Image (spheres, grey):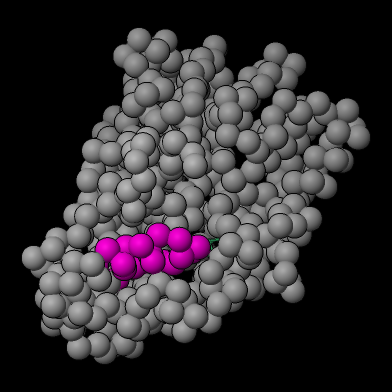
Amino acid sequence: MKDTIVDPVLSDKPKHECGICGIFGHEEAAKLTYFGLYALQHRGQESAGIVSANGDKVFLHKAMGLVSEVFSEANLQCLTGHLAVGHVRYSTTGESNIINTQPFLVYHKGMPLAVAHNGNLVNTLDLRKNLEEKGSIFQTSMDSEIVVHLMARTLDMGLAKAIKESFACIKGAYSLLLMTKDTMIAVRDPNGFRPLCLGRLENGAYVVASETCALDLIEAEYQRDIEPGEVLIINKDGLESVFPWAPRQRSYCIFEHVYFARPDSDVFGFNVYEARKRMGAILAREAKIDADFVMPFPDSGNYAAIGYSQASGIPLEMGMIRNHYVGRTFIQPSQSMRDFSVRVKLNPVRSLLAGKRVIIVEDSIIRGTTGRSRVQSLRKMGAREIHMLVSCPPTRHPCFYGIDFPSNKELIAAKHSVEGIRDHLGLDSLTYLSLEGLVEATGLGQENFCLACFNGKYPVEPDRTFRKDALAGCGC
Ligand code: SF4
């Protein structure tokens, strides 16, 4: 048995992706970027970094750990300049180590070029092989490094042309920030998988961030989303918007609304809190259950549970209490304690549960590893009936666009029917939100979304050798 175990609350959730934030035109650009990264910490907790520039020189600090662990007053003071780009990372390609931290900074003919990337390229192996055959030497195992190698080959043409040429051969999901010593460039892929928004500070400085919650924290005013396929070039002459590539079908990642994005953010034009509440309200329409109260497993499912409660009239209670002071990993007790890993973070409220019929609202079930012991702990407290509602459809397919879903072998819904999952979790009933209901909750039409993890229809053909394990046995 391992002594140290990873967060049991989040272990059945898909891992987050990455978050990016950049500022152009403020004398404390790095410090503001640092606060922006704080707001985006939920998108990646493995490493953090900021690169800054003053028009002449470039400064970089990055390390493994949370934003609060990586940066200090002292190292932020070294990140001088009016321009800064920051990144928080969870690795979806490349190992989790210091070499693969971002922003990734290279020098080409004496010119610095940094990249901070959220997303995942799907033709990585082909591009990398091709570049290596032409003499490129890679320093990392990240797909993001491919971007700078491609850019380096075309930089002599000028930035705008280099971007057009380089990204023309890149496929997949990318919301990213590039930075030279005097220019910040924001790029969103033509499908628009990942969010990216533009804001302005009171002094007129530009802010680009993965989510609007980063703008809120630094009191930047939201201007608009950066459009799919749009490139923003921001320098001392102002902001230039170009659309270098042919438009494609929009493929917004609907899981941003289900789980990834912060509820106080507006993503793809809609507030995430409201969208999650609507998922709960639509669940109340689709699944009518007689129960004494509805509860989430905090914090996932909180907002859908509120929506379900308000729409159904069934009271909302917090039947499990989360301990917010437990770190991401912790030491197992030396004597075996059953369900320790569950109870250390979530503990049921005995007096609330005894003899009650309970509805649990969850945002997703990925592996189904933690649900069973949580349900058992509610039974132990005397819950009479336990029903579960999930605010998205069964996740049956892996993601190739920057979300670390497990392989088909691990996805419980890829292997079992809904009835089989109900039985495995020890529930009285289990109901998933319909795909139509999920899309309805976002307020946009189905044609705007990537729904591949639910329906297996991938908007951009993935490199199937890249995640061979992910597709094993699924017949894709
Ligand atoms: S497959 Fe799922 S998680 Fe991945 S981009 Fe599409 S909707 Fe998002």
Q: Nearer the viewer, residue 388 or 79?
A: 388
The structure residue drawn at horizontal position 36% and vertical position 45%, both measured from the top left corner, is: 336
| Residue 208 percent location from the top left of the image | 43, 40
Q: Is residue 288 magenta?
A: no
Q: Which residues are magenta?
A: 361-378
Q: Nearer the viewer, residue 431 or 26?
A: 431
How many numbered dots are placed on residues in this image? 0
| Residue 283 percent location from the top left of the image | 31, 81
Q: Nearer the viewer, residue 451 or 363?
A: 363
The structure residue drawn at horizontal position 85% and vertical position 40%, both measured from the top left corner, is: 129
Q: Which quadrant would residue 187 be assigned to in this image?
A: top right
Q: Is residue 364 magenta?
A: yes
The structure residue drawn at horizontal position 49% and vertical position 80%, both measured from the top left corner, is: 420
Q: Which quadrant would residue 443 be assigned to in this image?
A: bottom left
Q: Is residue 163 visible?
A: no
The structure residue drawn at horizontal position 83% and vertical position 28%, both measured from the top left corner, is: 136
State whether residue 249 is above or below residue 292. above
Quadrant into which the C terminus falls: bottom right
State whether residue 244 is above or below residue 277. above
| Left or right placement of residue 399 versus residue 438 in this view | right
| Residue 112 percent location from the top left of the image | 63, 19
Going by the picture, which residue comes out furthest to the left? 351
| Residue 147 percent location from the top left of the image | 69, 37
Q: Is residue 116 visible?
A: yes
| Left or right placement of residue 7 versus residue 415 in this view | left
Going by the picture, which residue comes out furthest to the front? 335
Q: Nearer the viewer, residue 46 or 422?
A: 422
The quadrant of the picture showing ligand 1 is bottom right
Going by the picture, which residue comes out furthest to the right? 133
